[in-house]
Amino acid sequence: MDSVRRPSLKLEGLTPYDPKYLPAEAMMSANENPRDVSDELRRKIESAVRQVHFNRYPDPLANDLRDLIAEANGLDREHVLIGNGGDELLFDTALAWGGPGRTFLNLPPTFSVYAVNALLTDTDVLEIPRLADQDFAIDEEAVLKAVSGPDSPVDFTIIASPNNPTGLRARTEFLHELLHATDALVVVDEAYFEFSRMTMRPYLDQHENLVILRTFSKAFSLAGVRVGYILAHPSVIQEYLKVRQPYSVDAVSQAIARVIFQNRAEFEPGIEAIIDERERLRAELAKIPGVSPYPSHSNWVLFRIPRAGEVWQQLYDAGILVRDFSATPGLEGTLRVTVGTPEQNDAFLEVLKRGAA
Ligand code: PMP
């Protein structure tokens, strides 16, 4: 054969996820931690990795890591599931709660992976856009209406809190009300919760339909290693176990994540510094003529700026990579800058101030 049959129809018009990750001196586009793990932690990691048997399959459920996370959250391991980054667990969510004849409630603009996973699993999507004139807050009334009552078609929803790429966290009272109003699965994506200091963890006992998604990629500087986890009721975890890839979290990643989690207090000053710098960045951006930053509870600032595409290029030419959302529906004219080190943030602000002068 010199040809191949066409793939599944649902791939028509889909483009592969592209993080637009280009080499740059200051990487301020992917909401990573600007500080890598310390040399001391690296030495501990090296010694942990040395113990790993490469010829053996890893523990499929990463039970040692599960136990560490469970204990820190006052839970037992049945409430915890580890994944190959939060991304894998998001896909598993669509596999387990989506599918033909099922409905996912999406609140755009939000993390684009949610909608793609729905499409790949033939899940219907109901959209309730965030309120553009209220800093992209959730349209709470519309969401509660959509999920309420026995006739609601919604099987699951994912609420990023804080929401990527817009910045606000969801209100705890609203999430509470939502969890009460529906038996749909409600995934609260807390990938960035360390920067908002808000978690739904205390409410896990009360709601069988609550899933909390977390990651090692942001506050814990481990985006390159690929470890995430969910906290949920054991009955929900059992369903995830049916769809997950058996060995998705390799033994090296498990060993690294264990060391990082045991030493997580070490990351606290870095998190504090990011929160302080976020506020400084936002205040400085607001002083630049024509620039309107959105409020952020996370480790980035989304801002509106005239000729956003050109400004992206000016920044890139100066060695600074930010994320261009100006072609994303609902986010026209915006760029998102990940909070960097103070020096990176200064360099970023300098380019914008020069452009505005
Ligand atoms: N949720 C949100 C809102 C994110 O922005 C990301 C990373 N971009 C993830 C989940 C997944 O992160 P990871 O796969 O690195 O754990």
Image (cartoon, helix red, strand yellow):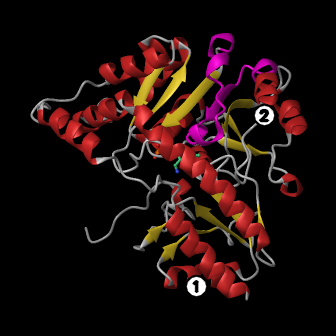
Q: Is residue 154 above or below residue 72?
A: below
Q: Is residue 285 above or below residue 235?
A: below
Name the amino acid type tagged 2. Arg
Lateral position of residue 36 relative to residue 34, left or right:
left
Residue closer to the observer: 214 or 283? 283
Element marked by disc 2 = loop
> What distance separates the C-alpha of mark 1 from that of mark 2?
37 Å
Q: Which residue is painted at 48% across and 54% down in the image? A: 32
| Rendered location of residue 119, percent (x, y) | 59, 48
Element marked by disc 1 = helix
| Rendered location of residue 101, percent (x, y) | 66, 34
- The magenta segment is 179-207
Residue closer to the observer: 324 or 144? 324
Lateral position of residue 256 relative to residue 323, left or right:
left
* Count of labels in the image: 2
Of pointers 1 and 2, the one earlier in the residue sequence: 2
Q: Which residue is painted at 65% across and 19% down in the image? A: 209
Lateral position of residue 335 relative to residue 291, left or right:
left
Name the amino acid type tagged 1. Gln
According to the picture, the residue beneath numbered tag 1 turns out to be 314
According to the picture, the residue beneath numbered tag 2 turns out to be 171
Residue closer to the observer: 317 or 285? 285
